[in-house]
């Protein structure tokens, strides 16, 4: 098995449980990703090799260098521009070059992250099937179609016919999003296999009980993830939550500085990273950017959440959160400290939010797990 992904944790982590399940069933599993993602892959016991752009930082630096107009886009329009340019025009060419040097021995199956668009080209050139592994909700068809346009020259350079949707849906799509949350059209995806999102936290040492803020007040978890971190919006969320009668645990990302926001009262704890699998059972409400990992992890625990989306797929998750009744969302221009505080107080005091989130947790628990899906892959692709 050859797994391929971009290097961001939000793309690596969702794929790890299936890779581990396949390895546990006796298959040889290799994983190609940017150097930044290799420690997480190797911590999961998977043989990794560096391929493509080394980090999210290098990817975004090139994106803003080549497409400076992106800085002027309104937040809600960023993803339509970013997905095809970032993952198609910028990420796919160097990934294709590296992957073509990694296919000896020839794999029997290639499983790629839905944002890693060189994998289907390599699989087609080898005459093997490729499986697309989602990192959240189904990427809207128009975004994938635009990305397909960006990578079309890569297909033709190898003498291959250019398929629709960059070849992402030619064989099988693994969907980690609860069915009731899917809002967009899915008719262009002919074969879908549901796969329960299973949290993966590794590479940060042993997972034990997290150090929590002092006291017995409700615990709020605040994170803006590891990629999008708008300091002004983060400060607005901090100001809102510090002013409430709650305990607050804040993560600022692996590259962030927990001391940047100054001294905090004992009921506030600042960290770079806390394994969410250990933290969520202690939480009452999650306030986040709405990234898929945090969003689905909180749902799996039945937690109400407030989504403050900034880019990527976060606006889709925020809309799904609010429409499902499992939480609330505020668009960037409306996310003032007063409105954030009011929203969190509502989530804490209205039982319906937790009840609806618990219902979605039940849906997630009923989805097929990694080992069951690994068996289907063996059966469907005869290896």
Image: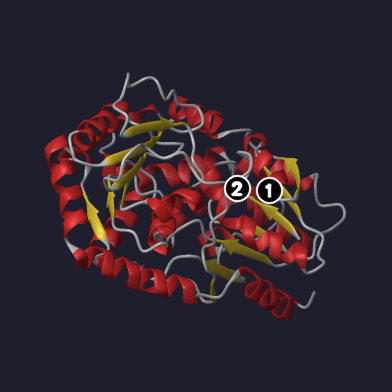
Q: Quadrant of the N terminus?
A: bottom right
Query: Dot 1: within a 10 Å radius of its alpha carbon, few (fewer than 14), some, or many (20 or more) residues?
Result: few
Q: Residue furthest right?
A: 105
Q: Quadrant of residue 27?
A: bottom right
Q: Is residue 116 at least partly visible in the picture?
A: no
Position of 26 with respect to 175 (left or right) is right
Find out whether the residues at labels 2 and 1 contact each other: C-beta distance under 8 Å: yes
Write down the residue under mark 2. Answer: 153
49 lies above or below 107: above
Residue 131 in view of the camera: yes
Real-space CA distance between mark 2 and mark 1, rounded to the nearest whole angstrom: 6 Å
The residue depicted at 21 percent of the width and 54 percent of the height is: 348
Left or right: where 42 falls relative to 354: right
Callout 2 crowding tier (Cα within 10 Å): few <14, some 14–19, many ≥20: some
Seen in the picture, residue 284 relative to 266 is either above or below; the reply is below
Count of picture labels: 2
Q: Residue at x 70, y 77 (%)?
A: 375
- In the rendered image, the residue lying farthest to the front is 215
Residue in the foreground of this view, choosing between 194 and 257: 257
Which residue is rendered at x = 30% and y = 25% of the image?
Answer: 264
Give how far across and how far down residue 20 sits, in percent.
Answer: 70, 60
Q: Residue furthest bottom?
A: 379
Q: Position of residue 320 (x, y in %)?
A: 30, 62
* Residue 157: image tag: 1
Please say if 4 is above or below 168.
above
- Residue 283 point in image, percent of width and height: 36, 51
């Amino acid at each position: 098995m050859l797994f391929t992904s971009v290097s961001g944790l939000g793309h690596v982590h969702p794929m790890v449980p299936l890779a581990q399940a396949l390895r546990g069933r006796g298959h040889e599993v290799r994983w190609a990703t940017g150097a930044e993602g290799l420690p997480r892959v190797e911590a999961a016991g998977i043989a990794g090799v560096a391929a493509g752009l080394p980090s999210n930082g290098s990817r975004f630096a090139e994106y803003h260098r080549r497409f400076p107009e992106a800085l002027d886009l309104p937040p809600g329009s960023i993803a339509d521009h970013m997905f095809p340019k970032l993952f198609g025009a910028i990420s796919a060419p160097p990934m294709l070059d590296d992957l073509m040097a990694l296919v000896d021995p020839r794999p029997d199956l290639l499983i790629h992250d839905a944002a890693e668009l060189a994998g289907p080209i390599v699989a087609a050139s080898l005459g093997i099937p490729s499986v697309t592994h989602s990192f959240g909700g189904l990427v809207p068809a128009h975004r994938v179609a635009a990305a397909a346009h960006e990578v079309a020259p890569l297909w033709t350079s190898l003498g291959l016919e250019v398929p629709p949707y960059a070849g992402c849906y030619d064989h099988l799509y693994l969907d980690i999003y609860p069915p009731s949350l899917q809002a967009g059209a899915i008719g262009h995806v002919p074969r879908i296999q549901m796969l329960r999102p299973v949290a993966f936290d590794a590479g940060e040492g042993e997972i034990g009980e997290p150090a929590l803020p002092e006291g017995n007040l409700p615990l709020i978890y605040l994170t803006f993830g590891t990629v999008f971190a708008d300091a002004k919006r983060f400060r607005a969320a901090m100001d809102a939550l510090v002013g409430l009668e709650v305990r607050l645990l804040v993560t600022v990302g692996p590259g962030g500085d927990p001391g940047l926001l100054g001294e905090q009262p004992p009921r506030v704890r600042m960290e770079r990273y806390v394994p969410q699998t250990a933290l969520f059972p202690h939480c009452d409400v999650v306030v986040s950017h709405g990234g898929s990992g945090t969003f689905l992890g909180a749902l799996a625990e039945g937690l109400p959440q407030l989504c403050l989306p900034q880019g990527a797929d976060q606006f889709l998750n925020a809309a799904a959160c609010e429409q499902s009744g499992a939480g609330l969302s505020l668009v960037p221009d409306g996310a003032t400290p007063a409105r954030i505080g009011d929203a969190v107080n509502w989530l804490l005091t209205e039982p319906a939010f937790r009840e609806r989130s618990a219902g979605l947790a039940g849906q997630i628990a009923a989805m097929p797990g990694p080992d069951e899906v690994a068996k289907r892959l063996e059966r469907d692709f005869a290896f």
